[in-house]
Amino acid sequence: MSSDTSPSSVRKILIVKLGSFGDIIHAIPTQQLIHHHHPEAEIHWLTEPPYAALLGRIPGIQRVWIADTKKWRRQITSLPEAFRLIGSLRRQNFDKALDLQGLIKSAVLARLSSARQVVGFSREHSREPASSYFYSDTLPGDNGNKPHAIEINLELTRSLDCRPNGASPLIPLNLPEEAGSYVDRQLDLAGITRPVLINPGAGWITKRWGAANYGRLLVQLQQQLELPVVVAYGPGEEDLVEQMEAAVGSPVVAFPTDFLQLAALCRRSQLMVAGDTGPLHLAVALGTPTVAILGPTSAWRNGPFNPEDVIVKRDLPCSDSYKRTCDQFICMDIPVEDVFDAVVRRLGQ
């Protein structure tokens, strides 16, 4: 089914991208391209609670809406909150809703917004094929040329007559002063400037290189290259820092950050080393050089978009399996020396 909503008549747009952190970062270039081509349009974004503060700092987003889908599933008493959200969205009279998530829940929310046109990925390119039943219009996300996740999202802008080819993966971010002040205080306490960041965490266990490996890498960076190193971590990742310290045999410079503080830290750093994680993709989006340690996800789709960044990855028959659990777990069995050499190459560039 197709709608007669022409791009020139679109004045209010809803982007639906609920999570995760890395997926949000990969979707922001889509919003920025729309904002560039349609500066007169009012762009809203529907997301989950952890990402609202970050999206509220992105230029061109008029309003951030919060869908706490996890709470809705856990607590039936929270359903009135969901109904109020849907009612508020419907009263906005959106001309177009773009579902960049490709899940049934995101497609349903996009449809329930009552936007005149609901655009999403075609069935064969959706993460959950049944989501396509809720769209009025679909577009392919994969052109067959191994597109990056950023490029896949950008394909939906064709419904607004945008030209996604050559769009920048870099994102603007208006950080609050307190985020930078917090990072500066932490760096000053450690006597560090322009550190190398290590981010040992990852949402999937199969994406983690291992805290002990990161600890040994930290020692090599400090002793052989005389580089200052900071370990970045978020809520619930304190044990990874403890494991690194156990491997090193001494305390490491580490402090927790939220997303905005992490962005400020990235801007003050010369390199980040991490797996396929939101912090890695944030660093890339802010122009910070990176070394990516990849396991079950593909380099062309989920690696750093910057061709100058270095990817360390094993070439195995099971590579790019996208498994969240694994009995063998050999794809991340990568020597510390390989990652150290990658850091040397990236810094040399």
Image: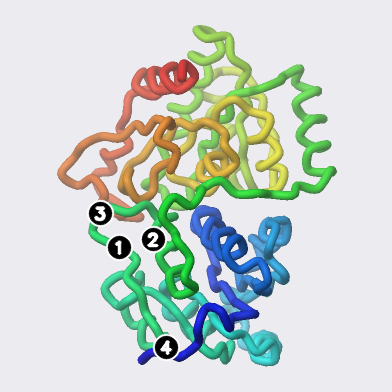
Q: Residue at x 41, y 73 (%)?
A: 102
Instruction: Judge from the rendering whether residue 183 lies leftward or rightward of residue 212; answer left or right.
Output: right
Identify the disc placed on residue 136.
4
According to the image, label 3 marks what residue?
145
Q: CA distance from mark 4 to mark 2?
A: 19 Å
Residue 15 screen position, x and y as percent: 56, 72
Instruction: Judge from the rendering whether residue 92 lies leftward or rightward of residue 325; answer left or right.
Output: right
Determine the residue located farthest toward the front in the rendered image: 8
Q: Residues within 10 Å of mark 2 (few under 14, many from 20)?
A: many
Q: Name which residue type carries label 2.
A: Ile
Locate residue 70: give its quadrant. bottom right
Which secondary structure, mark 4? Answer: loop
Above-or-below relation of 236 to 131: above
Q: CA distance from mark 3 to mark 2?
A: 11 Å
Q: Residues within 10 Å of mark 4 (few under 14, many from 20)?
A: some
Identify the disc placed on residue 142.
1
Q: Residue at x 42, y 30 (%)?
A: 308
Mark 1 vs 2: CB contact within 8 A:
yes
According to the image, label 2 marks what residue?
152
Which secondary structure, mark 3? Answer: loop
